[in-house]
């Protein structure tokens, strides 16, 4: 920590593969990760590098080893600790095997495929990761009562410099139609747990574009994707994804915070990765979206 400012490189949605598979048949996500880290090489001293979920796309231990090596080397060169959170594309077995609890400890495993949550103290700032993934390959997020109980217990005593909560699914409404069907299903549970606590920031991913909002007054910062970026300016009846990457530098002080996002263009001339119609979005949401996906999609598309 320099001048009482905690400096964090926040990246998300790396969607790595353990082999040479290309994301959507086009994007080399390992190459995209290395481009983002190279672009951020001159950020100076950092305290944390946080990856807020969808670390892997295929869930293999090999994919997590690629991530741990690249991010770990970058973090070490900047004097930082690396912290990882689970996302809906991640597999708990592969995550546990390589990243443990996402902090510096091995994940406790009793044979039950439960959520992987973790906690670290970084220069007096408490960093808590919550696993918002839903088993069965669903894309929406949900927090369990047991997680909220654990979180409440952790936050019952203030940390010297406050707390940060990291989870994959942002606890705020999405800006695009398909993502509206894949939000955190129960954000009010999290809001109740954070009321009156020392949590200063919530960091999240999943939306694949930079976004700022708030959960009952607690700031929520969403990082752009590494594997690709969602285009929030697309028409309300389509979902457009771009070949691009980015990250966010977050600087947290006792008096407040500053978040500066940056973008790293893709290497292809055709920067549109895919364009989904409403019918295509409905097909995806039917299989992967939240139980109330039809209502959410109708509201998002103005129908």
Image: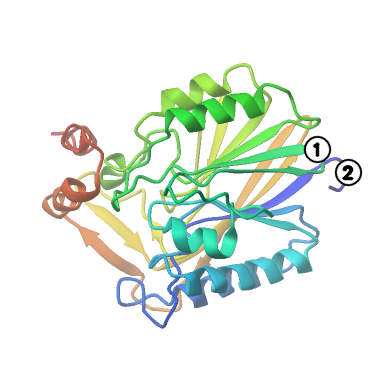
Outermost residue toward the front?
110
Q: Are marks 1 and 2 in contact (CB under 8 Å)?
A: no
* 112 relative to 56, above or below: above
266 vs 69, nearest the viewer: 69
189 vs 249, nearest the viewer: 189
> Of marks 1 and 2, which one's residue comes earlier in the chain?
2
Q: Position of residue 26 (x, y in %)?
A: 34, 77
Q: Check residue 197 in the rendering and tell me which mark sits there, or answer none.
A: none
**Residue under the image location 50 percent in, 28 percent down:** 148
**Residue under the image location 58 percent in, 60 percent down:** 99
Q: Check residue 3 in the rendering and tell me which mark sits there, or answer none.
A: 2
Q: Position of residue 271 (x, y in %)?
A: 36, 70
Q: Is residue 39 visible to us here?
A: yes
2 on left or right of 217 = right
Q: Secondary structure at mark 2?
A: loop
**Residue under the image location 57 percent in, 18 percent down:** 195
Q: Position of residue 20 (x, y in %)?
A: 41, 83
- Circle 2 residues within 10 Å: few <14, some 14–19, many ≥20: few
Outermost residue toward the top?
196
| Callout in the foreground (1, 2) | 1
22 vs 96, nearest the viewer: 96
Q: Check residue 124 in the rendering and tell me which mark sits there, or answer none.
A: 1
Q: Position of residue 129 (x, y in %)?
A: 57, 43
Q: Secondary structure at mark 1?
A: loop
Give the colour scheme shown.
rainbow
Q: Quadrant of the C terminus?
A: top left
User: Can you tell which quarter of the image residue 49 is in?
Assistant: bottom right
Q: Is residue 216 visible to us here?
A: no
Outermost residue toward the right?
3
- Circle 1 residues within 10 Å: few <14, some 14–19, many ≥20: some
Label 1 to label 2, Cα distance in Å?
14 Å
């Amino acid at each position: 920590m320099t001048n009482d400012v905690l400096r964090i490189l926040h990246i998300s949605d790396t969607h790595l593969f353990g082999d040479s598979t290309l994301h959507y048949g086009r994007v080399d996500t390992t190459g995209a990760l290395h481009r983002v880290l190279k672009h951020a090489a001159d950020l100076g001293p950092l305290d944390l590098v946080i990856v807020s979920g969808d670390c892997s796309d295929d869930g293999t231990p090999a994919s997590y080893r690629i991530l741990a090596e690249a991010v770990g080397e970058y973090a070490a060169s900047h004097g930082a600790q690396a912290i990882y959170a689970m996302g809906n594309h991640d597999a708990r077995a592969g995550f546990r095997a390589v990243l443990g609890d996402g902090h510096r400890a091995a994940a406790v495993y009793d044979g039950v495929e439960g959520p992987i949550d973790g906690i670290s103290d970084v220069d007096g700032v408490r960093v808590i990761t919550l696993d918002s993934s839903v088993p069965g390959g669903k894309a929406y997020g949900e927090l369990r009562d047991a997680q909220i109980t654990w979180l409440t217990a952790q936050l019952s005593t203030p940390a010297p410099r406050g707390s940060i909560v990291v989870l994959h699914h942002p606890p705020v409404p999405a800006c695009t139609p398909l993502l509206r069907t894949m939000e955190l299903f129960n954000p009010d549970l999290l809001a109740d747990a954070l009321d009156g606590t020392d949590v200063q920031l919530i960091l999240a991913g999943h939306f694949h574009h930079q976004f700022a909002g708030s959960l009952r007054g607690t700031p929520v910062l969403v990082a752009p994707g590494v594997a690709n970026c969602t285009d929030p300016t697309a028409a309300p009846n389509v979902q457009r994804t771009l070949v691009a990457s980015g990250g966010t530098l977050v600087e947290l002080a006792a008096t407040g915070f500053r978040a500066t996002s940056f973008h790293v263009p893709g290497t292809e001339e055709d920067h549109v990765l895919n364009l989904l119609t409403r019918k295509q979005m409905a097909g995806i949401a039917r299989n992967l979206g939240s139980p109330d996906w039809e209502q959410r999609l109708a509201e998002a598309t103005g129908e």
